[in-house]
């Protein structure tokens, strides 16, 4: 049997379901999934096996109109991931149709290599009637020459196997790029930080999800097989620190417990997690913070 391997970039608006699709394809949780938009900051690679093919997914940040340095760095990372990939899959939400954001992405697709294979995946198909799906498919294909169109529900798994099989068949022939048991190429420290940031985002709702970042400062392997993980949560104001800690420290305790439990399940062993909150008013303008997120600080320049 001939082996195949290559990169697939998932692009789309924030909340189009890219992270949910990535996790469904890989069969494990490697990308942060919340109801918040713009939660994926770095290009997270998840690795899926389909027959003799190894599909390396690049889950790019959602494409939107950037306003801040961090936004610009995220959008640059997304288009960088698309340009480097063997295949691009553009995700749109069935019930939202061709929004202004979708039009903007379609326009930007023209800047890619004309030989770049771009497939369309219409997600959340359970939210609309079939006749409007066919209409949307026709409209989208009249706006861009997609090589293939898929109707999927990333959350429920409908249509996902067909998409994965097609991607596997379209990748270039060649040896696998990662060991068989590896599902993500992000350092474990970064995955752990993402898990804690997801729990903070879910817990704090509208209060300050984009005003904070999480870094894993230390990771120590213990003799009993467990590990000790120290993380710092950077916030921009003293007031944010109070929100994060919560009454009698209840918020930070709940976040720590939820993050620790998920990390233990992911690693299959005991984890000792220690969270610290620090105020850094200018963390959005510090190059080191971007490196920790897997983004390029220079890409944030106006």
Image (tube, rainbow, N blue to C red):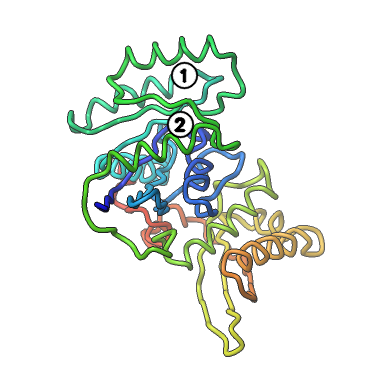
In contact (CB < 8 Å): disc 2 and disc 1: yes
Q: Provide residue 278's location: percent of width, then percent of height.
A: 58, 65
Q: Provide residue 236's location: percent of width, then percent of height.
A: 56, 54
Q: Provide residue 20's location: percent of width, then percent of height.
A: 53, 42
- Under circle 1, the secondary element is loop
Name the quadrant containing residue 90: top left
Q: Provide residue 174's location: percent of width, then percent of height.
A: 21, 53
Quadrant of the drawing holding the C terminus: top left
Query: On screen, 265 above or below 170?
Result: below
Query: On screen, 275 above or below 30?
Result: below
At label 1, counting other C-alpha atoms closer than 10 Å, the crowd grade (few under 14, some 14-19, many 20 or more) is: few
Q: Residue at x 55, y 14 (%)?
A: 130
Which of 279/191 is in front?
191
Which of 147/103 is in front?
147
Q: Earlier in the sequence, mark 2 or mark 1?
A: 2
Toward the front, the furthest residue is 1
At label 2, counting other C-alpha atoms closer than 10 Å, the crowd grade (few under 14, some 14-19, many 20 or more) is: many
- Under circle 2, the secondary element is loop
The image's mark for residue 99 is: 1
The image's mark for residue 22 is: none
Q: Residue at x 58, y 64 (%)?
A: 266
Kindly report the distance in space between the C-alpha atoms of the residues bearing marks 2 and 1.
9 Å
The image's mark for residue 13 is: 2
Q: Residue at x 59, y 14 (%)?
A: 129
Name the quadrant containing residue 229: bottom right
Q: Is 300 displayed left or right of 271 in the figure?
A: left
Q: Residue at x 40, y 58 (%)?
A: 286
């Amino acid at each position: 049997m001939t082996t195949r391997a290559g990169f697939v970039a998932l692009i789309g608006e924030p909340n189009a379901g890219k992270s949910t699709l990535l996790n469904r394809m890989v069969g494990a949780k490697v990308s942060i999934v919340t109801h918040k938009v713009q939660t994926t900051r770095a290009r997270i690679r998840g690795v899926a096996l389909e027959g003799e093919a190894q599909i390396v997914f690049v889950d790019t940040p959602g494409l939107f109109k950037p306003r801040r340095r961090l936004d610009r760095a995220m959008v640059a990372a997304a288009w960088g991931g698309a340009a480097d990939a063997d295949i691009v899959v553009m995700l749109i939400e069935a019930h939202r149709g061709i929004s202004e954001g979708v039009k903007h992405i379609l326009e930007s697709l023209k800047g890619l290599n004309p030989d770049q294979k771009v497939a369309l995946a219409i997600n959340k198909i359970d939210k609309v009637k079939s006749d409007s799906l066919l209409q949307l498919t026709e409209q989208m294909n009249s706006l861009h020459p997609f090589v293939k169109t898929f109707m999927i529900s990333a959350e429920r798994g409908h249509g996902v196997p067909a998409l994965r099989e097609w991607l596997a068949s379209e990748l270039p022939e060649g040896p696998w790029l990662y060991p068989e048991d590896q599902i993500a190429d992000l350092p474990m420290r970064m995955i752990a930080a993402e898990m804690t940031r997801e729990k903070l985002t879910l817990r704090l709702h509208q209060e300050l999800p984009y005003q904070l970042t999480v870094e894993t400062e230390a990771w120590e392997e213990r003799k009993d097989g467990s590990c000790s993980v120290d993380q710092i949560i950077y916030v921009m104001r003293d007031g944010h620190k109070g929100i994060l800690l919560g009454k009698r420290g209840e918020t930070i305790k709940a976040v720590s417990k939820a993050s620790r439990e998920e990390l233990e399940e992911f690693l299959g062993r005991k984890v000792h997690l220690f969270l610290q909150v620090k105020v850094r008013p200018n963390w959005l303008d510090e190059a080191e913070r971007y490196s920790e997120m897997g983004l390029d600080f220079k890409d944030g320049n106006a």
